[in-house]
Image (cartoon, helix red, strand yellow):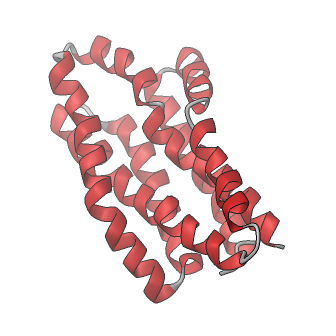
Amino acid sequence: YGWVIVGIAALTMTLVYGVRHSFSVFFPSILDEFGWSRGSTSIMLSIHILAYGVLAPVAGSLGDRWRPRRVMPMGIIILGLAAASCSFANKLWHFYLIFGIGTPMGLAFCGWPLLSPALSNWFSKRRGLALGVGQVGGGLSFVYGVFAEFTIIRFGWRMAYVVMGLSLIALLLPLFLLLFYY
């Protein structure tokens, strides 16, 4: 059953880190709509990465205390709602708050800080292989930008954020509530 958990981890990594890694796909549309400078707009990704760095140890600590199975659904909901909420942003500070603080909070609580120990506890033999296969989703998350680009072209950047956020919740939440054990 541990390999089922590895598969869930790889899918999770693809989708949740896809929110961060698709930023470059949203960037031109946001610049076009608002006319902000590239520097001011790109700071939202810097804030996002900084916030993730601060929140990852907190998430790991809560995972130690309450187990990843309890913490990760909260992270999925936070990340999904924060990504969808980006569609409502009209001011730069909205993006700083929602994408810069909200999405990394959800990401830390459903990403690698909790997936790694969960996978490690399923495997004593072949642990390195399990962690490596689970981390494949981190690489695939860059490909998620293709889905984001398709959605932006088809429906606009605002609806693409809604689709991204709600699809995270719709796909991952049932997996974690029904199948993810640790």
Residue 135 located left or right of residue 65: right
Q: Quadrant of residue 43?
A: top left
Q: Position of residue 22 (x, y in %)?
A: 48, 31
* Image location (x, y in percent) of residue 136: 66, 45
Q: Nearer the viewer, residue 124 or 67?
A: 124
Q: Is residue 76 left or right of residue 118?
A: left
Which residue is rendered at x = 75% and y = 67% of the image? Answer: 126
Q: Residue at x 37, y 50 (%)?
A: 103
Q: Residue at x 28, y 16 (%)?
A: 31
Q: How many marks?
A: 0
Residue 149 locus on image (x, y percent): 55, 20
Quadrant that contains the C terminus: bottom right
| Quadrant showing the N terminus | bottom right
Q: Is residue 91 visible?
A: no
Q: Position of residue 131 (x, y in %)?
A: 65, 60
Dividing the picture into quadrants, the one containing residue 123 is bottom right
Find the residue positioned furthest to the bottom: 65
| Viewer-proximal residue among 86 and 15 | 15
177 to the left or right of 50: right
Identified at 43% across, 44% down, the residue is: 83
Side of 9 relative to 79 (left or right): right
